[in-house]
């Protein structure tokens, strides 16, 4: 595991963007696993800047997002479909047919999960998976539990997750209660994982994830088993390591 700490948000975002752009530049048909949430916003901004400078093209890239809420209209401003469009997809040359996000409005969610896993399988392997970290140790929307699920599945969001994500909605009652998420098995199958964590409010959970026991109670702790994990932290998040 390679942990790097940054004293500025800008440097952290640049470093993360360099790693992602570097993969796209060096791997002929790169497959990227993408994340949402507050953490990657600045990283996507930096990637768009690199694209606008002509440093990189996404024409031959395929992307798979980690998760999407269930029963949120695709064009709702807080859907992860909208998030990805406004922060990244609308600004780069990634063809629409090569962007995958689980469909939380599918009439049969189990079929949708199966379809999503098949699409990932067909792509070969995710070259680089970008991850953020939930306050309860979730990755994607894999919540703490007595057991973790390997593939894409429907999940009931934890109370703490609803509270954390209420900031994006008018009230906590409007936060969707369920989501579709890639499973931990799929996440761990990525060739390389880039975990990015920012803020003092994540200092305890990142310590548990990286230095605590490997347990399904802290899904991110399973990342300790990955042979190619890069962790980028700001000084606040790294405060307790
Ligand atoms: C969200 C997403 C995760 C994200 C995490 C942390 O709910 N499902 O993929 O990494 O929670 O989000 P943030 O970066 O906003 O703290």
Image (cartoon, rainbow, N blue to C red):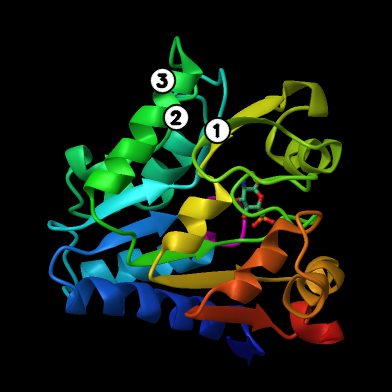
Q: Residues within 10 Å of mark 2 (few under 14, many from 20)?
A: many
Label 2 – label 3 distance at C-alpha: 5 Å
Q: Main secondary structure of the magenta part?
A: loop
Residue at which label 3 appears: 111
Q: Are marks 1 and 2 in contact (CB under 8 Å)?
A: yes
Does mark 3's beta carbon lie closer than 8 Å to ligand 1? no
Q: Residues within 10 Å of mark 3 (few under 14, many from 20)?
A: few
Residue closest to the far top: 107
Q: Is residue 175 left or right of residue 91?
A: right
Label 3: state its secondary structure: helix
Q: Residue 127 appears at what percent x and percent y?
A: 32, 67
Work out whether mark 1 precedes mark 3 in sequence or the reverse, and give the earlier one. 3
**Picture layout, residue 140 above or below residue 10:** above
Q: For residue 118, what is the image quadrant?
A: top left
**Picture layout, residue 162 above or below residue 18:** above
Q: Are marks 2 and 3 in contact (CB under 8 Å)?
A: yes
**Picture layout, residue 55 above or below residue 219:** below
Where, quadrant-wise, is the C terminus in this rendering? bottom right
Give the residue drawn at x 24%, y 55%: 124
Q: Residue 221 appears at what percent x and percent y?
A: 71, 67
Residue 190 visible, this orientation: yes
In reply to whether residue 216 is colored magenta, the answer given is no
Q: Residue 226 appears at what percent x and percent y?
A: 54, 74
User: In front: 16, or 186?
Assistant: 186
Residue at which label 1 appears: 153
Q: Is residue 131 left or right of residue 56?
A: right
Q: Is residue 44 left or right of residue 238?
A: left
Give the residue drawn at x 57%, y 70%: 195
**Picture layout, residue 182 above or below residue 19:** above
User: In front: 12, or 190?
Assistant: 190
**Magenta-drawn segment:** 36-41
Residue at which label 2 appears: 113
């Amino acid at each position: 595991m390679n942990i790097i700490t940054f004293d500025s948000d800008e440097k952290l975002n640049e470093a993360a963007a360099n790693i992602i752009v570097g993969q796209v530049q060096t791997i002929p048909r790169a497959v990227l696993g993408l994340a949402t949430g507050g953490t990657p916003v600045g990283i996507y901004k930096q990637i768009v800047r690199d694209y606008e400078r002509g440093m990189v093209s996404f024409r031959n890239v395929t992307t798979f997002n980690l998760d999407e809420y269930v029963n949120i209209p695709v064009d709702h401003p807080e859907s992860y479909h909208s998030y990805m469009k406004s922060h990244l997809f609308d600004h780069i040359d990634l063809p629409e047919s090569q962007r995958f996000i689980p469909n939380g409005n599918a009439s049969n969610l189990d079929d949708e999960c199966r379809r999503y896993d098949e699409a990932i399988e067909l792509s070969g392997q995710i070259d680089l998976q970008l991850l953020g970290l939930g306050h309860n140790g979730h990755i994607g929307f894999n919540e703490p539990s007595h057991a973790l699920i390997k593939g894409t599945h429907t999940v009931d969001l934890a109370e703490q997750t609803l509270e954390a994500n209420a900031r994006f909605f008018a009230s906590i009652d409007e936060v969707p209660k369920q989501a579709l998420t890639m499973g931990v098995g799929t996440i761990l199958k990525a060739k390389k994982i880039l975990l990015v964590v920012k803020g003092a409010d994540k200092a305890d959970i990142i310590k548990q994830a990286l230095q605590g026991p490997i347990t399904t109670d802290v899904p991110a702790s399973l990342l300790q088993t990955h042979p190619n994990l890069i962790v980028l932290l700001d000084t606040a998040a790294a405060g307790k390591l």
